[in-house]
């Protein structure tokens, strides 16, 4: 009798999609069913079981020079090359369009929302800070739907400003994309949102060089990543080696 | 008895078309107008007056009313009323004053007219015109008239009296149709000209309103019937106009150019409100007028094979919201420009296109010539305004980089590569940029269009790699961005 009741209860929870809220770990294969967005970096995708999960809030964190922007542009390039749309909320207006194009992004499919550089932000209209404005823009894009990846660049936002944001901000964003095909990606210096369903990729990296003397040039970024996911969607460390590039 | 009744009016002045149309509209909604059908004589107008006897009285009264109304507008007209349009048209051209034909006597009325009268029936949306369309472009009655003249046929009744079978045998079916015209018969029913529709809604407010929230309700009330009207006519709005009559007797007017024809009332209202949020009226509003420039509706074929993009309505609303939040020039699709200028780019409206159904991955040409990268490319985080730096040279290379900028630690240079010298824009040195130019300023201080500099990639002791440059004319150093 008790077993029957338990089965009925589990079935009801599953039907109402409450089981994911109650359980702590994702079942094997569930992530693949939900779909994921490949980063197009093969070792990382292998470790992530295909890429970043859709419908979840993910983070790429790291210090300056660790390759966060490079990885994000790779992700956006993969998505736009598949004919899907992506958006980038550029809080401090840091995107280098030439780098984006070199990464292979189909620029026509990238919605670029430019914030203001620090000096401009002080003169920006209204009382809204650049960060609040960017979060509002992110929310609008997520609510509109239709974008496979929506990334927000918070790398150069002072930590003090980020800490002033209510923590419910991230819960609200997570709620906005839950069940959708959108991956929301935060580019941050330190892990920030700690989404239960998403994951955090912490990067460390250093530029690598080729040649010597006057023929020396920047060749790429050697990166290593540590995956953290509260639900053990993916975890572990992976090193990509130097990503060869044209400087 | 109240059968078919058609009226024709004819004025001597060639510029009388608009007045004739206005007079005719006062009497009947079913009008074949020369000003609408441009291929007909603008001095003439034809209308369906069936049933009007119950309103005005007998045919003579109607004809007299028509002439009087035209005279009130300063126009002297001929009027012919008959049971067929053909008879009315033939008679109004050849008889002055008022001509009334009793029902069933059309053939008798037009009979005395010369066969040359058939020429006026050539062209237009008339019975003879229909005959002409079926017979071919060279179906002018001239050849027929000449033939009839040779046969000694001078009038329409003489032509009508000829045996139809013999006419068909000698001159073909085309001549038989002309013979029916000569009898005053209509070959096809009247196709009334549809008046040009205005998609406009207005509302006079009892009390002036201030602020966008009450205006939102008013706009919704105006846009919903307009949207229904557009849908009935299979039209969409290409341009949306709103005129706000203010209590200061000024008119606050805004026009929105829509990216695609749309007619969803909620979308239109949102777009208007977002625009008015950026450009609010300076005073309270007395009267609201909303109008659209109509255009044929959009026909969309969705694909089963590609992921659907958001609808233009959704994208337009999103872009309007984002532009209201971030600024009009801060949202769009980035695009590279044909220039070596460091950091040059332009912004385009965000309008992603659908992929071709059987080419899920766009080819190189579809991606504007972008080649698929063989290896990931290092990204530069660019400071839109370069950061002023102090650089100590060591052996001809940067040895130490420091700056006042918070967040950039600076320090000893561990590894560097360069210099790479670039220059350009010297031919427009110090020339101001054209107003409204979309090309963003290069990432350097000042507003000069030229650049001449040496670039270095430097890795500092803290592990961060920066791109720095030295302006050759001022010898000043800047940090352009950092590799991340």
Image: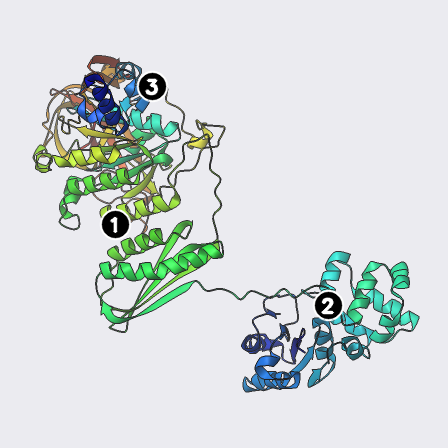
Q: Which marked residue is nearer to the observer: mark 1 or mark 2?
A: 2
Q: Is residue B150 left or right of residue B218?
A: right
Q: Secondary structure at mark 3?
A: loop
Distance from disc 2 to disc 3, alpha carbons, whole Å, reads: 77 Å
Q: Which marked residue is nearer to the observer: mark 2 or mark 3?
A: 2
Which chain hosts label 2? B
Q: Residues within 10 Å of mark 1 (few under 14, many from 20)?
A: some
What quarter of the picture does the C terminus of chain A occupy? top left
Residue nearest the viewer, comparing B187 with B385: B187
Distance from disc 1 to disc 2, alpha carbons, whole Å, reads: 61 Å
Residue highlighted by disc 3: B375
Tag 3 or tag 2, which sits nearer the N-term?
Answer: 2
Residue highlighted by disc 1: B324
The answer to whether residue B475 shows anywhere in this view is no
Residue A178: x and y in percent read 25, 32
Q: Which marked residue is nearer to the observer: mark 1 or mark 3?
A: 1
Asked if the residue at tag 3 contacts the one at tag 2, i.e. Cβ–Cβ closer than 8 Å, the answer is no
Residue highlighted by disc 2: B186
């Amino acid at each position: 009798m008790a077993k029957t009741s338990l089965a009925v209860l589990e079935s009801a929870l599953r039907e109402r999609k409450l089981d994911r809220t109650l359980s702590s770990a994702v079942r094997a294969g569930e992530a693949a069913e939900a779909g994921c967005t490949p980063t197009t970096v093969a070792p990382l995708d292998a470790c992530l079981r295909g890429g970043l999960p859709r419908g979840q809030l993910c983070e790429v964190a790291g210090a300056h020079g660790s390759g966060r922007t490079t990885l994000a542009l790779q992700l956006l390039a993969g998505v736009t090359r598949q004919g899907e749309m992506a958006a980038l909320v550029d809080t401090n207006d840091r995107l280098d369009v030439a780098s984006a194009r070199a990464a292979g992004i189909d620029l026509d499919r990238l919605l670029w929302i430019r914030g203001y550089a620090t000096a401009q932000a002080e003169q920006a209209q209204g009382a809204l800070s650049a960060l609040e404005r960017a979060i509002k823009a992110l929310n609008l894009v997520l609510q509109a739907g239709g974008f496979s990846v929506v990334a927000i660049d918070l790398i150069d936002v002072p930590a003090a400003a980020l800490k002033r944001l209510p923590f419910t901000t991230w819960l609200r964003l997570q709620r906005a994309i839950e069940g959708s095909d959108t991956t929301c990606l935060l580019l941050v210096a330190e892990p920030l949102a700690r989404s239960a369903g998403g994951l955090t990729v912490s990067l460390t990296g250093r530029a690598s060089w080729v040649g010597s003397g006057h023929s020396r040039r920047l060749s790429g970024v050697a990166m290593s990543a540590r995956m953290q996911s509260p639900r053990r969607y993916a975890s572990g460390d992976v090193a990509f080696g130097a990503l060869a590039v044209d400087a | 008895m109240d059968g078919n009744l058609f009226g024709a009016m004819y004025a001597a002045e060639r510029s009388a078309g608009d007045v004739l149309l206005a007079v005719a509209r006062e009497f009947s909604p079913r009008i074949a107008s020369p000003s609408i059908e441009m291929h007909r004589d603008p001095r003439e107008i034809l209308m369906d007056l069936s049933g009007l006897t119950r309103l005005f009285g007998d045919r003579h009264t109607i004809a007299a009313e028509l002439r009087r109304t035209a005279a009130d507008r300063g126009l002297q007209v001929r009027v012919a009323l008959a049971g067929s349009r053909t008879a009315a048209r033939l008679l109004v051209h050849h008889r002055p004053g008022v001509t009334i034909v009793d029902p069933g006597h059309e053939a008798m009325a037009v009979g005395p007219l010369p066969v040359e009268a058939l020429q006026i029936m050539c062209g237009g949306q008339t019975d003879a015109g229909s005959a002409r369309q079926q017979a071919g472009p060279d179906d002018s009655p001239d050849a027929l008239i000449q033939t009839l003249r040779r046969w000694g046929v001078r009038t329409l009744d003489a032509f009508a009296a000829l045996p139809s079978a013999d006419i068909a045998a000698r001159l073909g079916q085309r001549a038989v149709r002309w013979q029916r015209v000569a009898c005053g018969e209509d070959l096809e029913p009247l196709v009334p000209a549809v008046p040009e529709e205005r998609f406009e809604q207005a509302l006079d407010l009892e009390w002036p309103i201030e602020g966008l929230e009450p205006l939102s309700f008013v706009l919704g009330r105006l846009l919903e019937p307009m949207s229904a009207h557009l849908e009935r006519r299979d039209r969409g709005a290409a341009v949306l106009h709103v005129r706000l009559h203010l209590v200061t007797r000024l008119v606050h007017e805004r026009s929105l150019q829509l990216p695609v024809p749309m007619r969803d009332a909620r979308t239109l209202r949102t777009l208007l409100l977002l625009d008015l949020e950026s450009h609010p009226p300076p005073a309270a509003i007395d009267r609201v007028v909303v109008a659209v420039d109509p255009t044929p509706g959009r026909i969309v074929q969705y694909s089963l094979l590609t992921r659907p993009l958001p609808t233009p309505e959704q994208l337009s609303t999103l872009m309007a919201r984002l532009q209201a939040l971030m600024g009009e020039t801060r949202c769009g699709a980035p695009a590279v420009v044909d220039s070596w200028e460091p950091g040059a780019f332009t912004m385009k409206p965000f309008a992603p296109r659908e992929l071709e159904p059987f080419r899920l991955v766009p080819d190189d040409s579809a991606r504007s010539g972008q080649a698929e990268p063989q290896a990931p490319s290092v990204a530069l985080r660019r400071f839109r305004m370069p950061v002023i730096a102090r650089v100590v040279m060591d052996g001809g290379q940067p040895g130490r980089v420091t700056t006042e900028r918070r967040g950039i630690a600076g320090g000893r240079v561990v590894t560097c590569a360069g210099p790479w010298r670039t220059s350009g824009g010297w031919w427009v040195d110090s020339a101001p940029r054209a107003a409204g130019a979309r090309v963003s300023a290069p990432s350097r201080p000042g507003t000069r269009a030229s650049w001449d500099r040496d670039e270095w990639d430097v890795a500092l002791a803290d592990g961060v790699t920066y791109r720095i440059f030295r302006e050759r004319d001022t010898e000043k150093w800047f940090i352009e961005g950092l590799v991340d």
